[in-house]
Image (spheres, grey):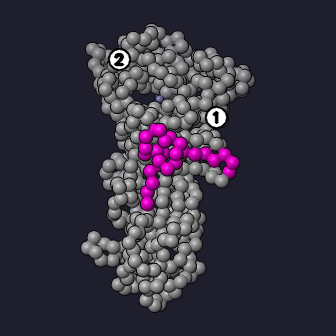
Amino acid sequence: MSLVYDGRLAPEVPPQGEIGWVMGEQGYLEPVYATDFPFLDDNEGIVAYDLGVKGTHSGKSGGLGNTLPHDPQDPFATAEIKFCMNWLAGYVDADFGEDYLVIPSWWSWLSKHVPASYARVRVVHEDGTHIWDDYLDEDGCTPYLDVGSFTEYTLEMWTDMEKDSGTTSPKKITVLQQAADVWEDEEWAEILYFGVQTSALVDGSQYTVELKPWFGSRATNVAPVAALVLRHSGKMAYLDGMETYISTKLDGDLGCTGTYYTGYAGHVCVVFDRPYWKYVIAHEIGHRVGAGQTAWFCAGYDIDDETAVYSSNANCNCDHIPEWSNNFKGRWHCLQSREEIKTAQGEGWAHAYGTMLFNQQGSTSGNDAAFVYYKAMNYVIEDPIPWSVEVLPPIYVNAKNNITRMEQFCDDNMVRNGTEQDWLVFFTTVWQDTTNRFSAAELIAVSDLAPVTSYWSNLVWAVGVLHTVDTPKYDHFTLKGDQAGVNH
Ligand SMILES: [Zn+2]
C-alpha cells in the first residue's frame, strides 16, 4: 500500500491500518490512519479536514496513476468508501442533566465531534467530476461510493441540512454565515472542505472513512442543534416542507441586529455568542415552528416599567438585567417577568421547545426536563429582612417544578397576565406527562383554533372543541394549567 501526495511518492509501504499519507510539518510524508485527528491546514479561515489536503490542487504535476511504481497490490483496483462526516461543536449551556448534545465549553478541548446528520455533501473526483451530491443520512454518512486506488477526492460539506431529501416536501434548515440579504441562497452556508487520497485499495472491498474537522464556526455550531430538530421532527412538530434559514451574521443593514425570530418566512437570527448557546438556538427555532399559528409567536415586548403589567416585585421583573445586555432588548422580558399572557405564552413555548428538544422523555439518566436559561436571574428572599441574589447564566431550571411564580410574587395584577417561567412549566408538563399528554402538534392546533387574544379561557375553549369537554385529555390540560399557575 503506497500513496502519492502532490506528485511525490510515499517512501515505503505503510503498515496495516493506514489508509494513506499526508505531508507533515517537516515536509515529509506521514502515514494517516482512518482514526487520525487532525491534520491542520488553512484556507481563508474556513477549511477543516483531518485527511489529506484541501480540495484545490492547482499546480500539481503529472498523472498520479502514471507515476506509480509497480505495487504488490493492484493500483487499478476499485472499492467502495462510505464517508461519515462530523461537526466540531460545543455549548456554554450544556451538561445540566439533559440528554442531547451534552458538549460543554466550545472553546476548550471539551469540544467534540458530532455526526453531521442530513448535511449537504459533494464528493468531487480529482478530475472534477461530482461523484455524489446529496444530503447525508441520519448518522451523517454517505452511501458506499465507488472509488479508485491512488485517487484524490475532495469533500465539500455545507451547513445546509435536508431530511427526507428527494421527496416532494423535504424538511430543510440552512445555517448561513453571511448577511441576511442572501437568506435563501444555500451557497451562503458555511462550507468545510476535506481532502482524501486513496492508496492501493483491495479490489471490491468496502471502507468507512470518518472525517472530523478541527475547525468550527458560529454556523457549524448551530448545525447540530438544527439537525437534532430534524432528527426528532415528529416530536418537534417540524412539518414536511418546512424551511428555516438561520443567519449567524450580525448586520443591521441586512437583517440581524440581535437574536430573534424575524417573523418572516422562517428567517431566524442567532448572533454574537448565541450560536454557542444551544437552548437559545432551540428557542428561536421554537418561535419559528410556532409562527405559522396565531398565538405562540409574539412580536413586540413592552415589558419595562412603563407598562401596566410591570411588577415592582424584584422576583417578577427584569430590572437586574443591564440595558446594554446581549440582545439589546434583554430587559424587555425575562424568565421571571410578569407579561401579557400572550407574550408569556410565546416565550414559554419557545423555552419549552428547547427543553423538549434536549431531553428524552422518560429518561432515567437525568432530569427529563432540564432547561438552561441564558439571562441573569434575581432572587429576593424575605428572611426576614429582604436580600437579593443575582445569579448569572447559564442557569439550570427544572421545567417540571410548579413554582407558580406569578401567584407567589406578583399577584396584585394577574388577570390575563403570566410569567415565562410558569408557561415553560405548563407547556413542558402538559407536553410530556401521562397518557393524556398533548403533543407539540396538538398544542399548536389548540393555539391555531383559539382566538388570537390567547387568553386562558380561549385556550380551554379550543381544547374543548378539539378534544371534547370533560374528557381525561381536557381535564389534563386544565389540571396542568392550574398546577403551573397559568390559568389567569
Ligand atoms: Zn423568545
x, y (%) of residue 365?
A: 48, 47
* Amino acid at circle 2: Ala
Secondary structure of residue under mark 1: helix
The mark closer to the camera, 2 or 1, is 1
Q: Is residue 482 magenta?
A: no
Which quadrant holds the C terminus? top right
**Magenta segment, which residues?**
167-193
Q: Which of marks 1 and 2 precedes in the sequence?
A: 2
**Mark 2 to mark 1 CA distance (whole Å):** 35 Å
Q: Report the side of 14 relative to 473 (left or right).
A: left
Q: Quadrant of residue 193?
A: bottom left
Measuring 50% from the left and 16% from the top, which residue is drawn there?
340
Residue 474 x %, y %: 67, 24
Q: Mark 2 highlights which residue?
A: 314
Which residue is drawn at the image coordinates 43% and 38% (left, top)?
270
User: Helix, strand, or loop for circle 2?
Assistant: helix
**Image quadrant containing the N terminus:** bottom left
- In the image, 76: left or right of 320? right
Picture coordinates of residue 262, whole percent (x, y):
49, 31
For this rendering, which residue is in front, 470 or 143?
A: 143
